[in-house]
């Protein structure tokens, strides 16, 4: 009789920011299915996070919801001390929270620029710094994980693809790339691995106007050589692998999960 594969993240505590919807919720479910206890962070209303927690518990996993606006230092510090009080430590951070506030460049207000940078980039800095501090405080636990800690930043194909009409968003994702690589360089001697995931087009509330109607979906598919729009679980599976010991020699990379969007499909028949 075949035995079930061992869960890859057993005895590990994971924090997923913005785990109340979309990709974050998909990542929470995937980490929990591999045995991690998941802290589902949300910024304002708890409903989405409680739904994610409920789904995890229904499947036999462990999770709690915690409120914090990742762009506010006090909120982030409070969330990390709550995690320490409740679970003793943290092993995995998936820094997923992100927003769009689109506007043509000529019309973009300082407020729109600042809001996106605050959540998408400063939020990554604050959460990663607190996670790294906690990993260092706790020290190695090789019986649980080869790396002392794992940080996964949710970036985007727009860390390399320029995006007119979204300069604040593309700037934030380009910034995440060198934040992630510089942290990876600095933290590798402490056995802390830092990587990013670069999703392409994934069906979530952030971009519903891009896939909701058949016309919009057809236009979007022109940018995706692999011929389908991604699902949150496509990203959840990547996050599990990057956080697991199977990826123990991987640090400082962005793993694009984009159905080939970064292959410049406009050049496929124009050589
Ligand atoms: P989403 O809108 O469903 O999820 C964003 C999450 O971030 C929500 O849960 C939201 O509540 C949370 N959030 C927003 N501001 C916050 C704050 N200040 N503090 C804490 N949480 C906050 O969209 P999504 O598509 O699931 O996006 C998740 C991440 O994936 C984002 O970083 C986004 O840039 C990235 N991404 C998405 C796509 C895509 O196609 N959907 C592609 C590339 C990258």
Image (spheres, grey):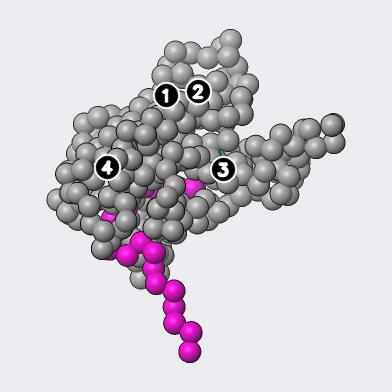
Q: CA distance from mark 4 to mark 3?
A: 26 Å
| Residue 256 disc label | 3
Residue 179, horizontal then vertical, whole percent: 40, 29
The magenta span reads: 1-23
Residue at x 78% of width, y 33% of height: 267
Task: Give above or below for 226 relative to 102.
Answer: below
Mark 4 or mark 3: name the one nearer the start of the chain: 4
Which quadrant of the view contains residue 122?
A: top left
Q: Is residue 34 visible?
A: yes
Callout 1 crowding tier (Cα within 10 Å): few <14, some 14–19, many ≥20: many
Q: CA distance from mark 1 to mark 2?
A: 8 Å
Residue 264, horizontal then vertical, whole percent: 71, 34
Q: CA distance from mark 1 to mark 4?
A: 28 Å
Q: Is residue 56 visible?
A: no
Task: Give above or below for 168 relative to 258.
Answer: above
Callout 3 crowding tier (Cα within 10 Å): few <14, some 14–19, many ≥20: some
Mark 1 or mark 3: name the one nearer the start of the chain: 1
């Amino acid at each position: 009789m075949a035995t079930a594969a061992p869960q890859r993240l057993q005895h590990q505590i994971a924090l997923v920011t913005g785990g109340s919807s979309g990709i974050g919720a998909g990542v929470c479910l995937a980490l929990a299915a591999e045995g991690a206890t998941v802290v589902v962070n949300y910024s304002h209303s708890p409903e989405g996070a409680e739904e994610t927690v409920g789904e995890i518990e229904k499947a036999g996993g462990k999770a709690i919801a915690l409120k914090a606006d990742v762009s506010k230092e006090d909120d982030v510090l409070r969330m990390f001390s709550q995690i320490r009080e409740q679970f003793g430590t943290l092993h995995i951070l998936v820094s997923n929270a992100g927003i769009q506030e689109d506007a043509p460049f000529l019309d973009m207000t300082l407020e729109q620029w600042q809001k996106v940078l605050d959540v998408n980039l400063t939020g990554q800095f604050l959460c990663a710094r607190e996670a790294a501090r906690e990993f260092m405080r706790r020290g190695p636990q090789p019986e649980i994980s080869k790396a002392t800690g794992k940080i996964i930043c949710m970036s985007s194909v727009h860390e390399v693809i320029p995006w007119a009409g979204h300069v604040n968003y593309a700037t934030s994702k380009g910034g995440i790339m060198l934040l992630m690589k510089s942290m990876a360089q600095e933290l590798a001697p402490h056995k802390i691995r830092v990587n990013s995931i670069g999703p392409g087009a994934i069906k979530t509330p952030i971009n519903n106007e891009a896939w909701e109607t058949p016309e919009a979906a057809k236009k979007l598919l022109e940018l995706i050589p692999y011929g389908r729009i991604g699902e949150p679980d496509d990203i959840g599976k990547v996050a599990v692998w990057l956080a697991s010991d199977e990826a123990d020699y991987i640090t400082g990379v962005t793993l694009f999960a984009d159905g080939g969007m970064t292959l410049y499909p406009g050049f496929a028949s124009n050589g």
